[in-house]
Image (cartoon, rainbow, N blue to C red):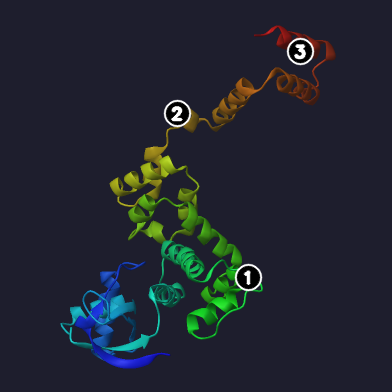
Amino acid sequence: MAEFKRIPINQITIPERLRAVEEDQALVIAQSIVEHGLINPITVRRTNAAKEGNYTLVAGAHRIRAYAINGDERDIDAMIVDADKAEGQLVEITENLFRNELSAIDRATFVASYRQIWEQKYGKIEAGRPGNRSNIVQLIAEEAVGSFAQHVADRMGISKSALKYLNQISQKLHPDVRDAVRGTPVADNQSALLKLAKLEPKKQRQAAVALRAEAGDLKRALAAIDDTPRALKEHPQKIIQSRLLDTWSRADKATRRFFLIDISVDLGIPKDDMNKMLAGLETAK
């Protein structure tokens, strides 16, 4: 049950947010409040044990910051919901997840957090698991049973394949890289994020350092951590040659024998010459 009420801002505790407050966005909201007033109230939950007040913020950090920019830090319109910490986080994610202005990296973070927090509170999502319609969070969760991916994809207005890519980013992208790309064009470039996520962890950490050094320029950052020899970069066929030699060095005699037979047939090498190569293989160390 939610209650609409005007509450003192100094009674609201603002916990660590999944999405940091962006000053530019807060400035836009501040101007809108001056012109039109607060259109959407913030959302809080009652927490009498909160360190600094009687409420904990669920959604609306940018709106509170906008009030501060306007020099108004007294009262603010709020929807007060009955929710514990986990439910409050789910409401925060739900509100943020379906905003069009979210960057690709923020969407990936929210998608991963939504399911993680829900399962921590209610248990693993499984088909046929009964739901409880006592509040909006559980109603949303019940809708997801059986096809959580489709549920989130529908609410975000994206395809399941796009959601799959967001999951790959959230699961494989190193935290150092996430921090390094925030505020850069890379943060909203899904292809670039997937490319970074495919790097091994050590390379990702190097990429994070390089991205900071190159002011978010992905091309320059990747070039800086590329340890491919210059000669191979300039001659792509040498890369193939290098890989073939590496594969040959790791193959046992039986595998090498099959390779020589296959290549001889493919090139039309006379049988006698092929036999000479196979004999040489047997005597080689």
Mark number displayed over residue 172: none
- Numbered disc 3: secondary structure: helix
Mark 1 lies on a secondary structure that is loop
Q: CA distance from mark 3 to mark 2?
A: 33 Å
Seen at 34% across and 93% down, the residue is 4
In this rendering, would 40 be left or right of 170? left
Can residue 40 be seen? no
**Mark pair 1, 2: CA separation:** 47 Å
Alpha-carbon neighbours of circle 2 within 10 Å: few (<14), some, or many (≥20)? few
**What residue is rendered at 15% in x and 82% in y?**
71
Name the spot of residue 207 as percent of width and height, x first: 38, 44
Badge 1 amino acid: Ser
Foreground tag (3 vs 1): 1
Q: Residue furthest right?
A: 271
Can you say whether 185 is above or below 231 in the image? below
Quarter placement of the N terminus: bottom left
Q: Earlier in the sequence, mark 3 or mark 1?
A: 1
Query: Which of marks 2 and 3 precedes in the sequence?
Result: 2
Measuring 45% from the left and 49% from the top, which residue is drawn there?
196
| Amino acid type assigned to the residue bearing label 3 in the image | Leu
Q: Which is more toward the observer, 31 or 127? A: 127
SS class, disc 2: loop
Residue 178, percent from left and from top? 38, 55
Image position, residue 181 (x, y; %): 36, 55
Residue at point 61% right, 23% down?
Answer: 250
Residue 147 is labelled as 1
Residue 229, labelled with which disc? 2
Query: Is 174 above or below relative to 257?
Result: below
- Depth check: give the residue in front, 111 or 273: 111
Q: Pointer 3: what residue?
A: 278
Gap in angstroms between the C-alphas marked 3 and 1: 56 Å
Give whichever of discs 1 and 2 has the lower sequence position.
1
